[in-house]
Image (cartoon, helix red, strand yellow):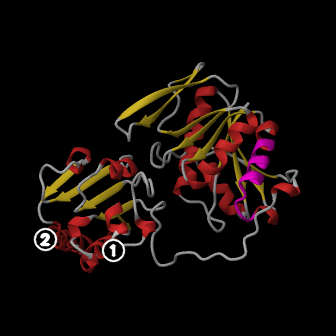
Amino acid sequence: MSVLVYTENWDGKFKKLSFELVSYAKGIAKQMNTTVVSLSIGNVDETELKKLSNYGANKIISINNSKLNALNNQAYTSVIAQLVARENAEVVVFAHNNTGKAIAPRLSVRLKAGLVTGVVGIPQSTSPFVISKKIFTSKAFAKVTVKTPIRILTLLQNAFGVNESIENTAIEQFEPALNETELKTEVVEVNKVTGKILLTDADIVVSGGRGMKGPENWGAIEELAALLGAGTACSRPVSDEGWRPHDEHTGQTGKIIAPTLYIACGISGAIQHLGGISSSKCIVAINKDPDAPIFEAADYGIVGDVLKVLPDMITAVKELKAG
């Protein structure tokens, strides 16, 4: 019996998200009195793999096969299903990101396993297996009971945190049986965004709405983001107007993010937008309308003209960094 966690890597390196997943799997393993098996697919060196042992991985399984260099949902599902059987895994953990959303449902069907997406903590109990997730755009929690022998979970980013739990871990190489009919995807070219922090990776996000008045005023957003080492985002009306690229659009119809700090500048707080950012640890809102819905979700609010408030914030951050 074990808890299997899929730890995604980016160009051979793990990010905070992967360490949070292992920490989370360790929390479940302690409840179930079992061990954590961490799976890595791709070309990751031993030093990087060993980092997973700092967060509770009892066993690290590495699969380095050139046929799996690109994410292929069918092939990855087959590989992970083989590991579930090999390690007798009763719980399988993914991140609630594009990769997790692509693989977890397929694996659920293949293994006839119960799937709970977007969980926010360890189970309330393991017998029966009861776990919580947010519903109604994070306005309520649902307690879900999973009755299948194998349970598959996707964890919301920043929902659990990173906890050190150092283990003396061995690294095993594994060669899965690959079905050539599942290897249909061929990647011929990869174009990556450079010079900016991706929203899905950002610990801090500075976001703007129509209160910014126009694209010519976005320099303040970008300057504050640069000072804070933050990603930049926007509301849907802003991307629809062409002020900002669509890949910065956050909300139910855009990117769903959960940074530690989300700064909403001139965003009214429509329910669709809040549905995409409500899992943020801390929300700071700046809006001249004291009755704007964003203030109901915000931890801190500033009532004022965002075009006047932002320069003051930038000055304050510069002073703090200088002093």
Q: Residue at x 23, y 50 (%)?
A: 294
Between residues 60 and 251, which one lies in front from this camera angle?
251
Between residues 57 and 303, which one lies in front from this camera angle?
303
Between residues 276 and 87, which one lies in front from this camera angle?
276
Residue bearing the label numbered 1: 243
In the displayed orientation, state which residue is furthest to the front.
Answer: 241
Task: Give the number of marks.
Answer: 2
What's the residue type where badge 1 is placed? Trp
Would you place residue 301 above or below residue 57 in this image? Answer: below
In the displayed orientation, state which residue is furthest to the top.
Answer: 127
**Is residue 71 inside the magenta stretch?**
yes
- Which quadrant holds residue 173? bottom right
Q: Position of residue 190 (x, y in %)?
A: 65, 75
Q: Nearer the viewer, mark 1 or mark 2?
A: 1
Label 2 residue SS: helix
Left or right? Give the position of 318 relative to 79: left
Q: Which is the main secondary structure of the residues drawn in magenta?
A: helix
Q: Residue at x 37, y 68 (%)?
A: 239
Q: Position of residue 171 (x, y in %)?
A: 76, 52
Quadrant in the picture for the C terminus: bottom left
Label 1 residue SS: loop
**Is residue 293 inside the magenta stretch?**
no
The residue segment tinted magenta is 69-82
Badge 2: few (under 14), some or many (20 or more) residues near its Cα, within 10 Å?
few
Left or right? Give the position of 27 relative to 225: right
CA separation in Å, label 1 and label 2: 20 Å
Left or right? Give the position of 92 relative to 123: right
Residue bearing the label numbered 2: 308
What's the residue type where badge 2 is placed? Lys
Quadrant in the picture for the N terminus: top right
